[in-house]
Image: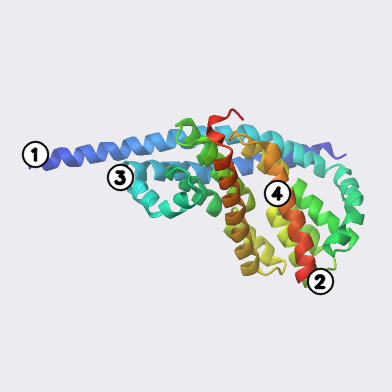
Amino acid sequence: MYNKYINVRKGDCMYKESISRGLRKGISTTWELTKVIVPVYFFVTFLKYTPILNWISDFFTPVMKIFGLPGEASLPLVLGNMLNLYAGIGAIAGLNLKAKQITIIAFMLSFSHSLFMETAVVKKTGMNVFIVLACRFSLAIISGIVLNLVL
Amino acid sequence: MNLLGFLKESTFGSIKSVYKLALIIIPLMIIMEILKDLKILDKGAKFLSPVSKFYNISKEATFPLIVGLVFGLAYGAGVIIESAKESNLNKKDLYVLIIFLISCHSVFEDTLIFVSVGANGILLLSIRITIAVVVSFFASKVIDKIDFNNKNL
């Protein structure tokens, strides 16, 4: 009977210990990510308040043809990549696009989006940023070209 | 430029994203510690061992993979950073994991966003996962060939 009591107490202790350890790890991980997320958030919001994104979008307008997209579709792609998916999707809604074109943009954005934020977070793990960006861009570009041909 | 608007949006926006992050990461870490102490995490790793065998990566690497797939890249990265601190992951694990996760992450949220504008969600998700599996498999083979873990890259 005593034995049982001891076991229960021991189990109880272990449980509390795991919770406090998890809490500590959770807070330290949140803090590590906060140090990355906050500055990038300020930078990205700053971009949003300048005409820079429109310039970039204008710059890519002629390239849209290889994906079977109208020139103005560079806006959702630039916003999705520089800001986040919600911004990109918001820009799609403002354009008059066919179902096929929306699918193409969706695929391209699903492989490559929120580049500043996600790359900064991934860099924190020690991963090579160049490989990350090369991988995402090539997936987005190849999927755009291929889908335009097969759909 | 509207400076006040910028400051307001970035301050509140960044507080909101950190809050959202904490809301997921802290309970996640607590649950993981409990599961670890109850040895359930080991059983889970055994269950996912086909995945780690397929890529020839450590068993521990499958958890950040699942977390990233379900919750998103930042959360997966958070778990990776924590595991890396405990040195459960080697360089190959990290590269295969990240290459998988950058191609495909937060499958629920991202897919639903695209469905909301009329994209075909099932097609999008299945192709995304397939591409992620293929690209990271290719990456794991390349890494095996160049004997990555012995190099200081």
Residue A24 picture location, percent across and down: 44, 33
- Circle 4: element type: helix
Looking at this view, name the residue that lies furthest to the front. Answer: B145
Three-letter residue code for mark 1: Tyr
Residue at (66, 43) in percent of width and height: A118
Three-letter residue code for mark 2: Lys
- Which tag, 1 or 2, sits closer to the chain's start? 1
| Chain under numbered label 3 | B
Q: Which mark is residue B38?
A: 3
Residue A66 picture location, percent across and down: 86, 60
Which class describes the residues within 10 Å of circle 3: few (<14), some (14-19), or many (20+)?
some
Residue at (74, 51) in percent of width and height: A138
| Chain under numbered label 4 | A
Relative to B10, say whether B133 is above or below: below
Residue B80 picture location, percent across and down: 52, 39
Residue at (61, 34) in percent of width and height: A124
Relative to B85, say whether A87 is above or below: below
- Circle 2: element type: loop
Q: Are marks 3 and 4 on the same chain?
A: no
Three-letter residue code for mark 4: Arg
Marks 3, 1: nearer the viewer: 3
Report the residue marked by disc 2. A98
| Chain under numbered label 1 | A
- Circle 1: element type: helix
Tags 4 and 1 touching, CB below 8 Å:
no
Which class describes the residues within 10 Å of circle 2: few (<14), some (14-19), or many (20+)?
few
Report the residue marked by disc 4. A136
Q: Quadrant of the N terminus of chain B?
A: top right
- Which tag, 4 or 1, sits closer to the chain's start? 1
Q: Residue B12: in sight, yes or no? A: no
Q: Are marks 1 and 2 on the same chain?
A: yes
